[in-house]
Amino acid sequence: MKVARLHSWRVSTAQAIDIQRSLARRVSRNGEPDSLRFVAGVDISVSRALGTATAAVVVLRYPEMIPVEIKKVSGRLTIPYIPGLLSFRESPLILAACRKVSLTPGLILVDGQGIAHPRRIGLASHLGLFLRIPTVGCAKSLLCGEYTEPGDEPGDYREILDNGETIGAALRTRSGVKPIYVSTGHLIGLEPAIYRVLECCRGYRLPEPTRLAHLAAGGNLKPEKDYGKAECRS
């Protein structure tokens, strides 16, 4: 994947917030991937004791959800965790892993927020601007906004509202488990994002791309050579 150069990551907290406010104006909340053949998931596993992390990108054939490429990068985290500034902590490693990916997915699901963020630019939106690929935030927890509980059937959802603005959806992906929080990252609308996330689910709470990326980042996913990569390219 190609990665644009938008700004430095070595910035102060005040500078990071200014960058977010500036870039948020460039986030596209509309669109839908067409001719989708590959979808990717990204996640990161952090060792707080060591101050290191491993970022993983898993590319899957769509809609079969068969992994075809897995890339990982490990390194030290140079920025502490600051609420609302997660992308400045995690993006450098994730983008380094993205640079190693040979296939270009038509959609990337991110374990993090999209525009469901106080400044409307969470990790998924930030990565989308760097990669210029449609991205969707698939978070396990709510960062901001409010919603009413969706129904218990897979596919049930309720909009997440923040000061009257729809910023995402609490989406039920499996009966009897908590919803996930889906929001536009970049270059995709909310309705198409919800549809694609559901298409990527395989009976778990998390959609398959981010579920496998989580396993890969933690060292719990078998190597890509075991998936028959050549067959999946056809």
Image (cartoon, rainbow, N blue to C red):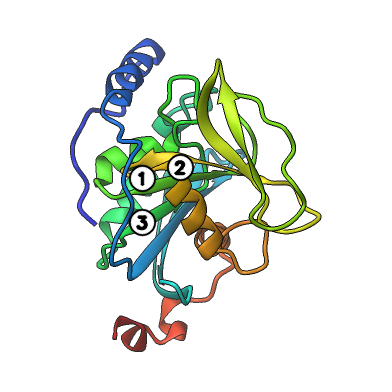
Residue 8 in the figure: left or right of residue 221: left
Q: Mark number for residue 25?
A: none
Proximity of marks 2 and 1: CB atoms separated by less than 8 Å:
no
Q: Please indicate, yes or no, whether residue 91 appears anywhere in the rendered image.
A: no
Residue under numbered circle 1? 188
**Residue in the image at 65% along x and 37% along y:** 141
Image quarter hosting the C terminus: bottom left
Q: CA distance from mark 1 to mark 3?
A: 9 Å
Numbered disc 2: secondary structure: helix
Tell me the quarter of the image containing the N terminus: bottom left
Q: Residues within 10 Å of mark 1 (few under 14, many from 20)?
A: many
Sequence-wise, which precedes: disc 1 or disc 3?
A: 3
3D distance between C-alphas at marks 2 and 3: 14 Å
Asked if the residue at tag 3 contacts the one at tag 1, i.e. Cβ–Cβ closer than 8 Å, the answer is yes
**From mark 2 to mark 1, how far is it between C-alphas?**
7 Å
Residue picked out by circle 3: 107
Q: Is residue 213 left or right of residue 12?
A: right
Dividing the picture into quadrants, the one containing residue 17 is top left
* Residue assigned mark 2: 190
- What crowding class fits label 3: few (fewer than 14 Cα within 10 Å), some (14-19), or many (20 or more)? many
Look at the numbered disc 3 and give the secondary structure of its residue. strand
212 or 44, nearer to the observer: 212
Image quadrant where residue 205 sits: bottom right
Position of residue 116 measured from the top left corner of the image (x, y, whole percent)? 51, 30
